[in-house]
Amino acid sequence: MKRLKTVPVLVVSAAILLAVIIIGVGLGAVQIPATDIIKSIINYLRGFRGADQAGPWQTIIMQIRLPRVILAAMAGSALATGGVCFQAVLRNPLADPFVIGVSAGAGLGAALGLALSEWLGSTGIALLPVFSFLGALLATALVYGLSLKNRRVDVGRLLLAGVAVSSFLTALMSMLIVWRQQDMQKLVFWMMGSFSGRGWEHVQVTLPYLAAGLISAGLLAGRLNLLALGEERAFYLGLRVEVFKAWALLTGSLLAATAVSVSGVIGFVGLMIPHIVRLLVGPDHLILLPASALVGAAFLIAADIAARIIMPPIEIPIGILTALSGTPFFLWLLRKRGQY
Amino acid sequence: MRRAKDEIAVVDGINQMTALAAQDLEFGFPGTGKKVVNHISLTLAAHEMAALIGPNGSGKSTLVRLLSGYLKPDSGVVWLFGQNIGKMPRKAAARLLTVMPQNIQFETPFTVEEIVRMGSFARPEGLDCHTAKILLQRLDLWELRNKAVTELSGGETRRAALAQALAQKPSVLLLDEPAANLDIRYQYELMELIAELHQETGLTALVVLHDLNLAAAYASRIIMLDEGQVAADGKPQEVLTPQNLANHFGVDAAVTVANDGVPRIRVIPPKHRSKEKNGQCQTLIDFRDHGG
């Protein structure tokens, strides 16, 4: 397939992201026209508050819909770029944080954080990403260690280790849910992935981790190209392989954990988005990473819109939607494996 | 040469004309208890082109990985222009020495040009467009520069990998069976190219080869390994003797040295031996069973 040019792809994906943000803010129980949304946000930024000064929709837009849409964008970009990191190091397009059990680890960590929040008090929500990160690291280390065969990551082992680790950690999470009956609904919803009831405080808590993850991935981009050639080649080209492999796995875990701590476990985004973007722009991580971040953000906002409007007034957990679309994609990719 | 002044310390009598020196290398894969490389010492002079030969399992690839620093020896040291390669910063070592590994199969569809540009990773100055163009043209890759490396033929893939290695501008290049699994024409074309590049750039090259006639045709020195040790080392006509071939490869071969001084090997297939060497057949088969 002919590759598309870098700049147009970035511009078009940014434009799509912007459009999806406006649609996401506009759709819901009350429909808000796009012009009103833009006006309202501009007014807000100029310091106008309240319905009389800034239009009737400002509260809905600024307090309810916009933070939710932004969180979906943050989670989407984190999952997609996290997927890119794992795929480069493990040299496998199937290495999605969800498939290889990293999301389950992050989920268990975060669930533990949620369950402990009554002892941790108000710091609970701020510590959620940290718990999530530790869980993700644990899962990454386990799966990586289990899938090595003759110093190489074996595809079959990787997927099997992912299934095993994922089931084990999810079982632990279910146990936690049974134990903490009072938090059951919150935890179950969160296990399935959802953006409902999220606000600016979640954006605020998550933003530093996302920024750290994205910057780290950006710094790694050129080296991910070398790692994608295989560890031995990368070594001969002058890369300190062990250092950068660990750095890339840490970055992937951090990004996956960031997404999970804000939205719960959402699968397959890190698998679908990088793959589609790779088909469009080629494998160079200097363009693959930013494009995946933009497309991943747009995709997850779109999925969240669908989650809200398919069965109103019921909101479908978004993780169900990404699994419904992602599993067939995964199976298709598994069948045509070898044409990476 | 700037490098000679700045970076070369004279170590243990290894003078500055030595590009690469292995000092009593020993290596065994963990848990096997068997030494794959058993007390190997050898030196490669700067600008030398040597071939490394030996039967399967004699330790050729392992020796290449040890010499490049990719594998750490159990004991012994590899000196690269007088510096211990195991202690050199990775990028500094990659500016002096690189490897074209065995069985290159690109799995990620980078373009040929992207692959070649990655070669300059260890070079702070990068690879300017002019040099990149010359390199691509020299290796007959210019027309293919925008093609995905996953779609190249076997010969093109080797040339792309070679171009990447050359973009590192190394002083020492180790090639692990660069011609393996190629049609005979491409084998000779690739070896011809490597020999020309060696002539043009003064590269120090060590080439692992399976085809002994290729080794004899292109290398001025042949190092023969057997069971992890250097079995013979010298000029092609000194190393490729019927006796060495019988002792270390287990083949019965006729060697003729042509006017150009290049030995040519003709292996006598086992089923013809009884006709050609009546009476010795039994001992030959015996030998092959124990020594093969």
Image: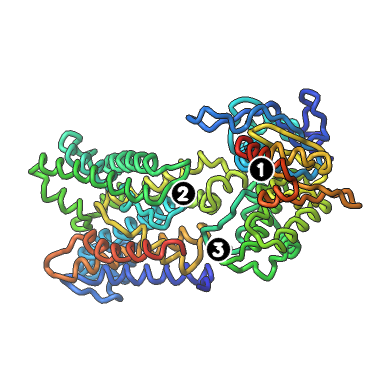
Q: Earlier in the sequence, mark 3 or mark 1?
A: 1
Q: Same subunit under labels 2 and 1?
A: no
Which residue has dot 2 on it?
A89
User: Circle 3 sits in a helix, a strand or a loop, which is it?
Assistant: helix
Task: Name which residue type carries label 1.
Answer: Ala
- In front: label 3 or label 1: 3
Q: Is residue B114 above or below residue B292?
A: below
**Residue nearer the viewer, A76 or A227:** A227
Residue at point 46% right, 49% down? Answer: A89
The part of the image, by quadrant, that contains residue A299 is bottom left
Circle 2 packing at 10 Å, graded few (<14), some (14-19), many (20+), is many
Question: Which of the numbered marks, if any, corresponds to residue B94?
Answer: 1
Task: Name which residue type carries label 3.
Answer: Thr
Which residue has dot 3 on it?
B150
Circle 1 packing at 10 Å, graded few (<14), some (14-19), many (20+), is many
Image coords of residue B106 (percent x, y): 55, 58
Which chain contains the residue that carries disc 1? B
